Image: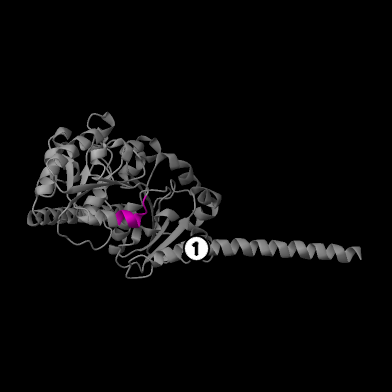
Amino acid sequence: MRKLISIKKEIIIILSFFLLCEFIFINNRLSILNYIRKIHKLQNKAQIKVSNFTELLFNFTINNNTILIFEPNEYHFECTPGFTKYFIDLGYNVDILMHKFGIDTFNLFDGTENIRLLVFDNLDNIHTHSKSLSFVIKKYSLIIIQTADINDKDIFNKLDLLNVNNSFFIFHNLEETENPIYSKYFDQNRIWTLGNFSKGLQVNPHYFGNIKIKDKNKKTRFFMTSSIYRNYRTLISSVEKLKKRNYNFEIFITGWIKSIKLNQIPNNLKDVFQIKYKVSYNELYQLVKSCDYIIIPFDTSKNFTLRYRTTKSTGSIQLSYGFLKPSIIDEKYSYVYNLNEKNSLLYENYSYLYNAMEKAILLGNEDYKILESNLYITTKQIFEYSLNNIRKSINSFY
């Protein structure tokens, strides 16, 4: 009798274990289904493939000529379609290991048959499975680390990415390459930068989809990303002058950093500003598409801002290039981004921001479309230059 009770208890424990496993499986499956449902809503011509990153560890086929893009952070997903586009054009299949927040970054992308997204909830998931993942990752033809943040060095070590010879590191701030562990990669053409700086190869990711040149809005719409290095005082002063002259315009501000809030704006100007933080990438892209110009008002009074001329690239420029939105930018920074009076509106220093914004509002539709067309030419040149740099990197590897 005691043996029978003992057996029953064991059966109950085993059944409980399997029920728990089923519960976890169902919840994980529901999570993945939610990702897939979200992707279904995207405006892709082809179905994009979404999986939980753990599928890499279980019977996941990695075909020849497949590269892996790894983004360890919860940001910079506006770069992912652009890097993917380069490798699709070069004939590769592309797998992307990324945080789930960025899966709608491909909502405008044309042709996703050769793209697979492998999503995780947080970087701790990758740390937990790093030993197994490091073995699988080595099966890829090339490995692209989309943000080579020095703070992520631990995960790079765990995945053995610093020791394999087919890994390439993208730095959004070249100052971080001063760490000696990266110094040898310059000679091997394995350091990429978003800007055209004194060292590293420029590979600028600005493709989002087949973006068309558009007419200017009757009510001029400016877009700006939030940053602590923006000159908001001059911006608000310029807006005040423009409103006094009864110009028809509005400004949209978004981003991750809440460096300006609606309660910091004078009451008489609040109808001009539309501020919304931490939007999805789908919302971000639709918003940028609806605007006419991108304002990049660097605060030149801060020494850190000078880095945007030598070692660091602003993410706003990717949006300007990719969506063909002429920038309004200080001329001291324009040459770094291949911007000039033919494809942008430049001002001499931040005290003349008002003049540039006024010119933007008054610019007629035909002249506006000329700016767009010239910017299109510039972006195509940057695309070809970047593509050739990738070829150079690959040739150095082989």
217 is within the stretch colored magenta: no
Quadrant location of residue 264?
top left
Quadrant location of residue 206?
bottom left
Asked whether 155 or 214 is in front, the reply is: 214
Q: What percent of the width, then of the height, locates residue 153?
A: 45, 41
**What residue is shown at x 24% (from left), y 57% (from top)?**
289
Q: Which residues are magenta?
A: 279-285
Residue at the outermost front position: 268
Q: Is residue 272 above or below residue 58?
A: above
Left/right placement of residue 351 relative to residue 63 reads left
Q: What percent of the width, then of the height, locates residue 254?
A: 31, 46
Q: How is the image coloured?
A: one colour
**What residue is shown at x 11% (from left), y 39% (from top)?**
355
Q: What percent of the width, then of the height, locates residue 151?
A: 43, 39
Q: Is residue 41 above or below residue 231?
A: below
Asked whether 24 or 363 is in front, the reply is: 363
* Magenta stretch: dominant secondary structure: helix
Q: Is residue 147 above or below residue 54?
A: above
Return the residue at label 1.
32
**CA neighbours of label 1 inside 10 A, class few (<14), some (14 to 19), many (20+):** some
Q: Is residue 305 above or below residue 387?
A: above
> Is residue 231 among what the camera can see?
no
Asked whether 6 or 157 is in front, the reply is: 6
At label 1, the amino acid type is: Ile
**What residue is shown at x 50% (from left), y 46% (from top)?**
158
Q: What percent of the width, then of the height, locates residue 386?
A: 24, 53
Left/right placement of residue 315 relative to residue 244 reads right
Q: Quadrant of the N terminus?
A: bottom right
Quadrant location of residue 370?
bottom left
Asked whether 183 or 89 is in front, the reply is: 89
Determine the secondary structure under disc 1: helix
> Is residue 136 among what the camera can see?
yes
